[in-house]
Image: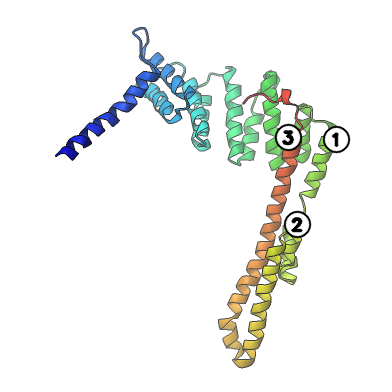
Amino acid sequence: MKALILFFILLGTGYRLPLLAKNAIFKKTDEMTDTTFLWDYGQKLQAHKKFHLAILEYNRLLYECPQYSSKNLVYLQIGQCYDSIAQPNHALRFYEEAIQATPDGDPLAQWLLLLSARNRIAQGKFAPALAELYSLDTLNLRNDQADIYHLLAAVALHHLGSADQCKNHLIQLDVEAEHLLKYEHAISASKRPNPNAAMVMSAVLPGAGQWYSGSKREAMNTLLINTLFLTLTIRTARLVSPLDVMIAILPWFQRYYVGGYNRASLLAFQRQRIKQRDALEIVLQQIPNNRIHGF
């Protein structure tokens, strides 16, 4: 019986704790409307990094006040909360809602498109991000917006393989010619090792493609395993019929042989991606600090 009473006491305390915390952070005054209270309370929670609770309050505002005139701002805040808890898919959905709810010509629309493009880039959706950036009214961008636009466009174009167009945007960010030249050389170097060449090399000599791709340990392992299976196949063929060899051993040899040259191609491709990433990071570090604003 005592345990049951203690359980209900703890249950009641647990239920009251969120309410007590809520009142400690923010209290509604007589002058506040429901919309003002929910908006301000959501802002307060967001400022205290209580992003899940802030999302709940913003959603309450949308549900309880369907005629609220600034829904685009609420969608924007929800998107930023989801960004803060590393949920870019949800953030993007609310940025898109904010864009739909923002009147034409409102300066906020430019920021929302930039935020949406940034989230698409973070998810690896470079082509849609670039399409969104190109839908901006670039002639009416403020200086800070223009810097962010050129930065995001450069990143998207780099990942889409358009190094020359990427350079055009980097020039707008005052990247010096010598660093652009280094970027060109790094991009040229990132085309090696070639995945097709790695595959052919491993098909001719198991392990050669892995060595070419820069993975010497895998190269030695692949060569050793294939050599052992080939030796086992030849010795077994002397003791039993060729058909028995084909049924029992050859499938394993084929598995490691075919898997080896496919692996060599994958290693070469991964090596290319690392070089491309490094090339972009090097040139982005050369953008003057005064051209990158908080975003």
Quadrant of the snapshot with the N terminus: top left
Q: Residues within 10 Å of mark 1 (few under 14, many from 20)?
A: few
- Which residue shows up at 61% across the image and 32% down it? 117
Q: Which residue is mark 2?
A: 194
Disc 1 residue type (three-letter): Glu
Q: Is residue 124 above or below residue 176?
A: below
Instruction: State left or right for residue 212 relative to residue 35.
Output: right
Quadrant of the snapshot with the C terminus: top right
Q: Position of residue 209 (x, y in %)?
A: 73, 64
Image quarter for residue 44? Answer: top left
State the CA–CA distance, disc 2 to disc 1. 27 Å
Instruction: State left or right for residue 285 relative to residue 106.
Output: right
The first of marks 2 and 3 along the sequence is 2
Which label was assigned to residue 32?
none
Q: Which residue is mark 1?
A: 178
Q: Residue furthest front?
A: 2
State the CA–CA distance, disc 2 to disc 3. 26 Å
Looking at the image, can residue 175 be seen?
A: yes
Disc 3 residue type (three-letter): Leu
Of the pair 217 and 209, the residue shown nearer to us: 217
Q: Position of residue 41 (x, y in %)?
A: 41, 19
Of the pair 245 and 2, the residue shown nearer to us: 2
Describe the element under mark 3 as helix, strand or loop.
Answer: helix
Which label was assigned to residue 284?
3
Q: Position of residue 56 (x, y in %)?
A: 39, 28
- Which residue shows up at 69% across the image and 36% down it? 155
Describe the element under mark 1 as helix, strand or loop.
Answer: helix
